[in-house]
Image (cartoon, rainbow, N blue to C red):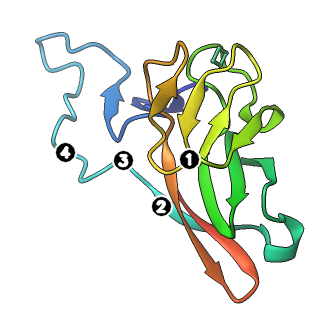
Amino acid sequence: MEPMDLGDIVLCPREPVAFVARPWNGRGGGKDLRGALPSARRMVDVTLCTVPELPDGSMRHYEHIGYDLLLANVGGTFYCVDAACTVGWDDLAQGSIDRDKKAVVCPGCGGLFSLETGQPLAGPGKFPLNVYEVHVVGDEVVVTFVY
Ligand code: FES
C-alpha cells in the first residue's frame, strides 16, 4: 500500500500518524505538524455482503478504497482482517480456514493467522494482521473499517 499524499502531509496507511512531507529545515520554511492533528485515523462502516452470501466455512476477498480485506464466516461468526499475508503479501482469501483455531492458513507457505486477533499462530509470520470489528445488522455484514 502506498502512503496517501495530501500535499504537505503524508498519511501512513498502517498507522494513525501523519508525516510532514518536507523535511524540517530549522529556518521556519517547513511545518512540524506533530501534535497539530487530533488524529489521522478515519473510521467508516462498510456493508461487505449479506449473511446468506457468505456461508459458514467460507471466506472472501473484498477491496475497499484500495485496501484489501478478508471476510470469513466461521461457525456463524464473521471475522474481518487484512487480506494480505504479512510475510509474502499473498492473498489470504486463496488459503483455507482452520476452524478449530479460528484462523486462516496462508496459501503461500502455510502461515497461520488468528481471525480473532490477527496474530500469527504458526509459520513464518512475525507481524499481525489488522483486525476490524464486524456487526451483523439485519442480514447485512457491516465492517467498521479503520484507516
Ligand atoms: S506468504 Fe504467507 S505465510 Fe508465507
Q: CA distance from mark 1 to mark 2?
A: 20 Å
Mark 3 burial class by Cα count in 10 Å: few <14, some 14-19, many 20+: some
Q: What residue is disc 3 on?
A: 40
- The spot of residue 54 in percent (x, y) is 83, 64
> Nearer the observer, disc 1 or disc 3?
1
In the rendered view, tell whether residue 57 sits above or below residue 36. below
Q: Amino acid at mark 3?
A: Ala
> Nearer the observer, disc 1 or disc 2?
1
Mark 4 burial class by Cα count in 10 Å: few <14, some 14-19, many 20+: few
Q: Are marks 1 and 3 in contact (CB under 8 Å)?
A: no
Q: Earlier in the sequence, mark 1 or mark 3?
A: 3
Q: Amino acid at mark 1?
A: Leu
Q: Is residue 134 left or right of residue 120?
A: right
Element at badge 2?
strand
Picture quarter with ligand 1: top right
Q: What residue is disc 2 on?
A: 43
Element at badge 4?
loop
- Depth check, front residue: 16 or 140: 140
Rendering quarter of residue 47: bottom right
Q: Amino acid at mark 2?
A: Met
- The spot of residue 128 in percent (x, y) is 45, 31
Q: What residue is disc 4 on?
A: 36
